[in-house]
Image: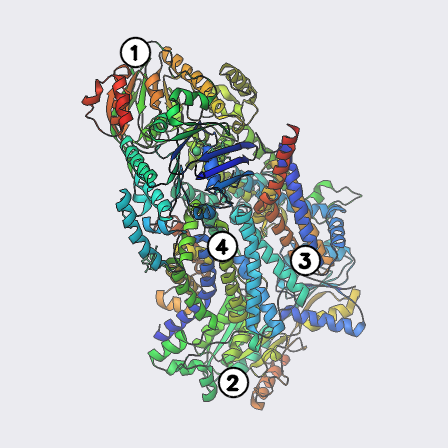
Amino acid sequence: MDKMPKWADIVLIPVISLLLAAFFSALVILAIGENPLEALKLMVDGALMRSSGWGYTLYYATNFMFTGLAVAVAFHARLFNIGGEGQAMIAGLGVALVCLYIPWPHWSLAILGASVGAACFGALWALIPAYLQARRGSHIVITTIMFNFIAAALLNYVLVELLRPVGAMDPASAKFPAGTHLPSFQDMFSTETTKMFRGAPANVSFFLALAACVFVWLLIWRTRLGYEIRAFGQSESAAKYAGISPVRITVIAMLISGALAGMMAVNTTMGESERLILNATEGAGFIGIAVALMGRNHPFGVFLAAILFGFLYQGGAELALWTNIPRELIVVIQALVILFTGALDNMVREPIEKLFIAMRRRNA
Amino acid sequence: MQFLDIVQLLDTSIRLGTPLLFACLAGLFSERSGVVDIGLEGKMLIAAFFSAAFAYYSGNAWVGLLAGIAASVLLAVIHGLASITFRGNQLISGVAINFLAAGMTVLIAQSWFKQGGRTPPLTGNGRFGNVELPFAIGPSDAEAAGRPLSQMIAEAGPVQQFYSELISGHSILVYLGLITVAATWWILFRTRFGLRLRAVGENPAAVDTAGVSVIQLRYAAVLICGVLCGLAGAYMATSLQAGFVKDMTAGRGFIALAALIFAKWRPVYAMWACMLFGFFQALETRPDLIEAVIGMKVQIQLLGALPYILTVVILAGFIGKAIPPKASAEPYIKER
Amino acid sequence: MTAPAIELKGISKAFGPVQANKDISISVQPGTIHGIIGENGAGKSTLMSILYGFYKADAGEIFIKGQKTLIPDSQHAIKAGIGMVFQHFKLVENFTVLENIILGAEDGAMLNTSLGKARKELKHLAEEYGLNVDPDEVIENLSVGHQQRVEILKALYRKAEILILDEPTGVLTPAEADQLFRILDRLREEGKTIILITHKLREIMDTTDTVSVMRRGQMTATVKTSETSPEELAELMVGRKVLLRVDKEIAKPGETILDVKGLRVIDEKGVERVKGIDLHVRAGEILGIAGVAGNGQSELLEVLGGFADGTGVITMNGSEIPLSGHGADGRARRDAGISHVPEDRQREGLIMEYSAWENTVFGYHRDKDHQAGLLMDNAAIQAEAQEKMDRFDVRPPNPKLAAKNFSGGNQQKIVLAREIERNPDLLLIGQPTRGVDIGAIEFIHQQIVNLRDQGKAILLVSVELDEIMSLSDRIAVMFDGHIMGERDPAQTNERELGLLMAGITDTSAVADDAKGASEEALNDG
Amino acid sequence: EPALIFDLGGKFDKSFNEAAFGGATRWAEETGGTFREIELQSEAQREQALRRFAEAGANPIVMTGFAFGNVLSEVAPDYPDTKFAIIDMVVDSPNVRSVVFNEHEGSYLVGMMAAQASKSGTVGFIGGMDIPLIRKFACGYVQGVKAVNPDATVIQNMTGTTPAAWNDPVKGSELTKAQIAQGADVVYAAAGGTGVGVLQTAADENILSIGVDSNQNYLHSGKVLTSMMKRVDNAVYEAMKAGEGLETGFNVMGVANGGIDYAMDEHNASLVSDDMKASVDMAKGKIASGELAVHDYMSDNTCPVE
Ligand SMILES: Nc1ncnc2c1ncn2[C@@H]1O[C@H](COP(=O)(O)OP(=O)(O)OP(=O)(O)O)[C@@H](O)[C@H]1O
Ligand SMILES: Nc1ncnc2c1ncn2[C@@H]1O[C@H](COP(=O)(O)OP(=O)(O)OP(=O)(O)O)[C@@H](O)[C@H]1O
Ligand SMILES: [Mg+2]
Ligand SMILES: [Mg+2]
């Protein structure tokens, strides 16, 4: 017998957790002497009431979809990929190499090439921790954390010593050639008369992220591989019994996860900055954890959670622009979301489960 | 390279290794009790901020220290709630705590000091001064002689150099760190509490059925962890530095975690591991020495990444296997 | 009459939706051995864990020596003079015996004094009860029997007056079990009270003074052992008359399907579990492997099923199959015509979170007939699952329900349906009826025999001697990784098999004994 | 209403950004006007901040730091009616005023002072992020030192290669200790917030330090020899004062036009002898008149002296 109906698990609990996070965020805002309602209004205004606000919201959401999916796929195999940040960083390198050194005739080809570059580099950065976990039992959480730092050092080295144009100050690569410039939402949706998404960084990669959501859904729930990944995640011993190789699944799941995390580099590096910069990821790899937790590891949930976090990000930036509330407020909100939907899940879940069991007893 | 260079390098290693050491021992207590803590970084950071803030307000580093410890313990309690009381995922809790600290410190700092997430610089008693051991050449001798201290030490004999530069002249917290190593070892292997702590990290059911509260033990460990992280953070803000700046721990909590694995969850090894990683950081300040010794330039990025790379190598089990306490990261669940 | 040593009144306990104990009352006289029997999942361990303060009851009261006692945790139980040896030992594996003994019962904040005192005390206890263990040995280096001794010593060191043992003999050889019962007798003579949980009716009949029977969370009866019989107890356990025999014809074995030569298995810890065994199974026969749990049977099945590595030569239908590396996984075995009903259906045979229909292709999910292009053909799989579940009488017959929501017997039927319906040449089957209710047992046994009669080869592993005796056409006994011998079920008896299971090959003295004689021998032992 | 955007180091870095803030505050106090400001917290905010200020009608928009260069060159053409001023970088756009400083000149002057104040003949330089701009500081400094004492040793360290190097006082402090160990008795910090740690340690260890950008002499009175003043405050002040009529184009601030100077006040009066002051002022005059040319590292990415 299930302890409670499915809808309670996938809707009720996340919503309650989210409300708790929102409540505590409001307390924090109050504590620093600002008005939470005002703050919310500013955030909504800045992020949702203008097309360019949406352009930022969706730009951030694109990143979070990729990293959220990355974390979710790994979670299905009961692997906690906390290395999305590093994987995305290294993937940026892949994108940069593809864009800088291959003369692309048109962006539509370039985006394919860059996607392959991003996915391969991201996957590669996940491969070593995956292999070490599968073969040598080294805990993937620790190794991926270490790999985040190693990635940062490596990227730093490459940008400063190898890719930085002579005389430039920024640790950043040269601008990508025009053939790789992706159409932004502004290019796509503006008409002669009305400018839409003016200046906003959202670009075609958003649709790539949507495609990734569909892809992950198909992969996890409709393919043999997905079946095996979930089986392995639920029970390693059963997977072994069924002839599903733990090593193979661990490695494949992490490769997919790393590739997905890496894909966000297409959005940031190719779509937005059009050159490789040092901190293009800006913590999106970690936000993927919150997104996956909130989205219950389901692509549709991830999609919604990514939009929510995109809103928080853009709204938070607006707050910082117009008030004295530093942008770190979003980091706090993000922490609270992770805390309540992830670590303190049982705090919300247990009373609700008890409630449902008691209700069922009474009805029986 | 001269003897004095080595002494100075080691001296720097100790200074930079001490925050790692406190954090590493903090992690040791927590993980030995079966609670994995990747939130060391966050606890250090929040302690750094609160110790600096309160040291600034009170003008007393000790007050700052207490405030830092209190803040760190508060986060430890949250981690305890999540991982012990509500049996949640300890890794996720750690991630949340790191973010919470990263955000809250800046938010509060901005609200209190309006200096973009930093505290004003600490002066005088707001910082921990350096302890000058008897017979060592210290700043007071230099003052009296009216000459730079570095020159006086450079002219002294090797024993005096070793004593004055390396042994003497550290903050009191550095000495406290070394004492903590011994205390940790003693508590762990010589006391009842230590026996129970090690047991609960291996098999909590055994502890439970032996009539000892798993929850109390784990909370005790997590609180000790909070106190030690508090020391680590306070050391950074009020001893190594004179104030808090945004994100000032800069990943040291994770290096400490790496050191803990490197040390295979043992206190004495932990000290050596932290000092080794402190040494790598010290090397970054002396590229000239590296060049003199190995005859070529070493990328500072490589030096910075070395602790992480070494830890991965250790984790891979190519050099001695690091086996964590058996029950670590497992919440103790009796009723499914 | 003196006050009972223990009296439980109206104990109830629910684990989420599962009602593990329901309004249970029981009373145990001091200086007696009180048995508790019941099927798997009846709630025996739960009840005792409540008495020991491991779980908290939802309702009910506990009286110790007539005094109402609150036992919110094990510390209170220990103070009240209760000691418990759990089904799964509660020892810290990398601690020494001595450290385990003093854990929680230290004398002061410093370890040295405690350790010194415990060492003396331990020596004393060891002499008194014949419970010898090296105090400085690390637990993980001890045999299971010795680990159990440490558990008993732990209780005695805490001056337990009431000792609870939860299925203590499941992991012991008959000889070790005999020794345990001698110790229990000794303790009873000293006036201690003992509660013994076991599945084995014989142990109940031999050692207890009174016995309580549990069924589905409730206490169905408490009787004096001298006034009951195994048949009556069995009936009380399952709630109806029990047929202990399976109807089957004489086997008509065909050619050899599986041939195993010199098989060795080394487990992850580097311990050799299977030490070079030879066996073969022919078409149309059931080879039963008997033995106390932990003597290498599980590893044997795992290697044959393809999820552990081994060395040796195994031929299946005349061609050799690899035992490690490429081609030595469950998938390859299935391709070779081997189906496998694993010992632990919840950890191996099923994905508990998966729906029944997903589970009906588990292990066969890569087969062509389950594919629709790149994707899995879920509609077809569901339809097929419905059919299988109907045929195997799985209740409720709803393929969309998650596996965890079926009872143990029905879970087992899902696994059987999946494996038998593949029409394998060889069926490996481990503990087919563990935790399964009597009704389902009969059904499952019938399915196994039917498969045999279709000319399939079956390798059966079970720790239930009754099951082995009634199903097998040949019986091999495993002890310590070796096959001690092979017997014809018609020409052996439980006594002879018991000796083999204890590693004693010289069974000539008992081999010819009539069945009655062997039972007599057991009774005076 | 003008707007000011601070770079990642933060408004209160006691140095570069703080100087800009000082200029804006002076303007606000004098005119009674108000200005918008934001401290950047992340890279992605650069563009957003620019656009949002421009859309909100802020004019002119002043930003501090070379890192805005790329972004501004993209944003500026989208808002032709808005005037932008960028400090430390050249952006070629009709509505942008690019203010650059001849830091090498000021560094030369403080280098001369360091060499004269040093007893050991060894002086130090601690840079922030390792970029050509900071090497320009270093190169000017070394030239100044060598001009006074050709045998002097200059120990140079950079804090790091990422923007984090602007805000790492711990490392600054350790680098200072390392330089002291190598005999340095005057250190020049051109490292933003990192310099706070440098000056602190120098004061703790009883040697002299040289501040940068703002006048930092007051931070440790009697321990800071002087500060190389880059009058970012003036640049910001003038930009804001000009308002919408801001003159665009290329604007070089050097010794000649008072954009670069060294700091003298009551905090360092006792440290700078009249001789020292005289010799430095003489050099200053020569630089202003063009008689003395200090090599600019960024002109060819090399430095003639080590
Ligand atoms: N379980 C234990 N009980 C008592 N003492 C112990 C135990 N384990 C280690 N020690 C002792 O602790 C001391 C060192 O502690 P620690 O483990 O931090 O360092 P170490 O050098 O790793 O020691 P070891 O010799 O065990 O490797 C040694 O004297 C060691 O013998
Ligand atoms: N910790 C637990 N959490 C949730 N459910 C449990 C727990 N322990 C036991 N149960 C459930 O309670 C019921 C009674 O289990 P219990 O272990 O008491 O049975 P038992 O009679 O000891 O069986 P066995 O003979 O297999 O040991 C079962 O349905 C079991 O699944
Ligand atoms: Mg050791
Ligand atoms: Mg049981």
| Above/below status of A49 relative to B118 | above
Residue receiving disc 2: D116
Residue pictured at 22% horizontal, 18% vertical: C513
Tell me the kind of residue under disc 2.
Gln
Judged from the image, the quadrant occupied by ligand 1 is bottom left
Q: Is residue A175 visible?
A: yes
Query: Residue D72 has which mark?
Result: 3
Q: Give the spatial CA distance, label 3 vs label 1.
A: 87 Å
Q: Chain of mark 2?
A: D
> Which color mode does the image show?
rainbow
Q: Nearer the viewer, mark 2 or mark 1?
A: 1
Where does residue C360 sit, x and y in percent of width and height? 49, 22
Q: Quadrant of residue D197?
A: bottom right
Tell me the kind of residue under disc 3.
Leu
Disc 1 residue: CB within 8 Å of ligand 2:
no
- Considering the image in quadrants, where does the C terminus of chain A appear? top right
| Above/below status of C258 relative to C180 | above
Q: Give the spatial CA distance, label 2 vs label 1.
A: 107 Å
Tell me the kind of residue under disc 1.
Gly
Q: Chain of mark 1?
A: C
Q: Are marks 2 and 1 on the same chain?
A: no
Q: Give the spatial CA distance, label 4 vs label 2.
A: 40 Å
Residue receiving disc 4: A158
Q: Nearer the viewer, mark 1 or mark 4?
A: 1
Residue pictured at 33% horizontal, 40% vertical: C187
